Amino acid sequence: DNMKIKLFIILLFSLFCTGCHSYTELNDISIVSVIGIDYQNDKYHLVVNVIDGSLDDKEIEKQITTFHSEQSSLEEAFHDVYLKSSKKLYLSHLDLLVLTENAVQEKFVEVIDNFLENNEYRNNFNIVLLKDTNIKEFMQENMQAEDINQLIKTNERETGFSAIRDFETILKELLIDKNSYLPTISYPNQELTLKGFTLIKNYQVYQELSLKESILLNLLQNKIQKAYLNETNILESQTLITTNKNHIAIRFLMTIQEDNRFEEKTKENIKQFLNKFYEDDYDILKLTEKIRKNDYRYYQNTDLLLQKLKFDFTFKIKEKETYLQRGAIYETK
C-alpha cells in the first residue's frame, strides 16, 4: 500500500511538472508560420512571420511578428533572424514557404537544400511563387498562411485554377526530372490574387500558365472537381492516363452542365497544350516516368521519346439536366 501511495505521489508530481513545463515552453517559443525568400543583388532576402503565443486566462493570444534579414547565404540570414528573436523559433509548424520568381530562378537548389538539411521542418508545408510583388512589403502585411492556403484550396475545389502543392510532392517531382510547378500569387493594390501555375524546368522558372492552361493541367492531372471551361460548367471530372510504349491514351469521364461543343473545343485545347510542351522537350505530365515503369526495355531503347508520343483522347460525357429541362416533361405539345 505504501508503494502504491508513493507511485501515486510521483505520478501526481510528474503531471504537475509537465503542466508547468508546457506553460514555460509556450511562453518561450515563437511558432514560424510563413517564410518568404527573395534573391536580389547577390543577397538572400529572408522574411519570417512568427506567431507568439502567451497564456492569459487559459486562452492563447496570437500576435504576428515579422523578422527580416539580408545576407549572402541563406544560413547566415536564418542565423541573423535567430539573433533578433528573444524566443526560440519553432519550425515544425511551418505552413507556407513563399518564394519570389527570382529566388526560384537563381537559387532554387540552395533553398531546397536548406530545408532538407534542417530536420526541424516537416515536409508537408505548402509552397507558392510570389510574382510582381516585393517580398518584404508583402510579408509585413501580416499575411497569414491560412489566408493564402485557403485561397488556393477554394480555387482548387471550385474553379480548377490552382492546386495546393506541398514541399514533399514538389521534391519528388524534381527528383524525377528536375521539373515541377508551383501555384502563383500576386498582391496588386494590396489585394491577394491568384495567377495559376508557374512551371519549373531544370530548377528554374520556365513558363507561367494562363488560368485556362492551369485548368487544363489540373484536368490532365485528375485534379478537377469543378471548373468553367469552354463556356461549360464542369460538375464532376475524372481523368485516366495509360501508356503503351509511345501511345498515350487519355480518357475523360465528366458530368457537365451544358455542351456548347465542349468535347470538340476541349480536345483541341489539350492537343495544342501538350504539343506546345512536348515539342520543347518539357514533360509536363511526367509521361517518360510512366513509360519507364510500364515498359523499361522500350524506354531504354528509344531516343527522343517525347518527340515520338502519340495521343488518343476519349471523352465520356454526361450532361446534367437543369431544373427547367426536367420540368419540360410536363409540357404538352
Image (tube, helix red, strand yellow):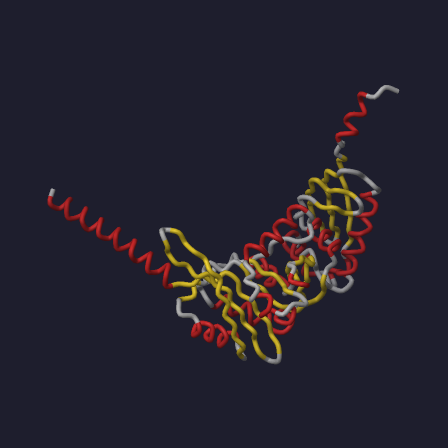
- Decide which of 211, 21 is in the foreground and name it: 21
Q: Is residue 195 left or right of residue 231?
A: left
Residue 104 lies left or right of residue 74; in this view the side is right
Is the residue 114 above or below the residue 318 in the image? below
Q: Is residue 244 left or right of residue 264?
A: left
The quarter of the picture where residue 286 lies is bottom right
Q: Position of residue 253 (x, y in %)?
A: 72, 40
Whether residue 243 is visible: no
Residue 143 position in % (x across, y down): 56, 61
Q: In which quarter of the image is the C terminus?
A: top right
Image point (83%, 21%), residue name: 331
Residue found at x 77% / y 46%: 313
Q: Which of 73 and 21 is in front in this view?
A: 21
Above or below, 313 against 285 in this view is above
Q: Quarter of the image holding residue 29?
A: bottom left
Question: Looking at the image, which residue sits at the far left?
Answer: 2
**Residue depicted at 58% across the width and 60% down the height:** 127
Q: From the viewer's perspective, is residue 20 above or below residue 233? A: below
